[in-house]
Amino acid sequence: MGRARLVILVNGPFSTGRLVAVSTPLLELRNLHAQADGNSILRGVDLIVRDGEVHALMGPNGAGKSTLANVVMGHPGYVVTAGEILLNGENIAAWTPDERARKGIFLAFQYPEAIGGVSVVQFLRQAIAARKDLQELSILEVRLDLAEWMDRLGMDPAFAERHLNDGFSGGERKRNEVLQMALLEPMIAFLDETDSGLDIDALRIVANGVRTIRSEHPAMGVVVVTHYVKLLEEIEPDHVHILVDGQIVHSAGPELAQSIELDGYDAWRPVAT
């Protein structure tokens, strides 16, 4: 949860001397630049996510949307060349991915990897123990929580014994990501094109899972990376941002997504000279 700090309220050129509480953003990106293989991808991204907010990040292919999510998660394939990533006011740009995950950053992958030989319940037991900084976690406790959330997400109980994402359909992989999010209870979750490859029924199941988790954890921030407005009709954002050529070029309310659906991104693309 974002921390509060005290500031002196100023009215015009003179200080009133009155202290007021100002909430520290849950996540703040300041002038964030990043590259991969020597190529600049993010070129000065500024973004503030406060407790409980849902932000949608949209943009054309190659704009840097998935890169942004991966950079915040600490993917080793990207190098931060300038700027800051602040989690509750602390710059985490030098932290490893596991340190970020332990502190409450979660990334639902666009293409979740399969891990043969590791069951869903084994994976979650280790992940939850790491998130809660526990040396050991009761397998019974995990199974009870897992069974409850699988029921709420409409998942077959046998799912827990299957190897992680091994042989899973696209919809099963995405629901498994939402299941992980439910049990890990992150402070902020990035959903990287979670709607990709889903039919409308699967999309609604996944979106309902996200809404259920948010109702249980109303302070959790969410950043939805998507091309399509359909997911945003199911998970209504507070803010929509357009990312073009590695920069956020426009931000507005949920109505912006509908505008993009009708008119595309041409109005925000750089004009060739």
Image (cartoon, grey):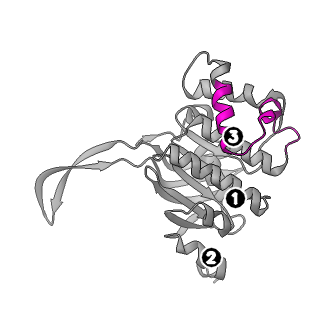
Decide if residue 193 is in sight here: no
Q: Earlier in the sequence, mark 1 or mark 2?
A: 1
**In whole angstroms, how far apart are the C-alphas of marks 2 and 3?**
36 Å
Bounds of the magenta span? Answer: 142-168
The three-letter amino acid code for the residue at tag 3 is Asp
- Give yes or no for contact between labels 1 and 2 (Cβ–Cβ under 8 Å): no
Report the disc number at residue 204. Answer: 1
Q: Is residue 54 above or below residue 61?
A: above
> Does residue 217 appear to the left or right of 59 in the view shown?
left
Q: Residues within 10 Å of mark 1 (few under 14, many from 20)?
A: some
Q: Is residue 36 above or below residue 163?
A: below
Report the disc number at residue 260. Answer: 2
Mark 1 against mark 3, which lies toward the viewer?
A: 3
The residue labelled by disc 3 is: 151
Quadrant where the N terminus is found in the figure: top left
Q: Earlier in the sequence, mark 2 or mark 3?
A: 3
Q: Earlier in the sequence, mark 1 or mark 3?
A: 3
Decide if residue 11 is in sight here: yes
- Give yes or no for contact between labels 2 and 3 (Cβ–Cβ under 8 Å): no
Q: Is residue 76 magenta?
A: no
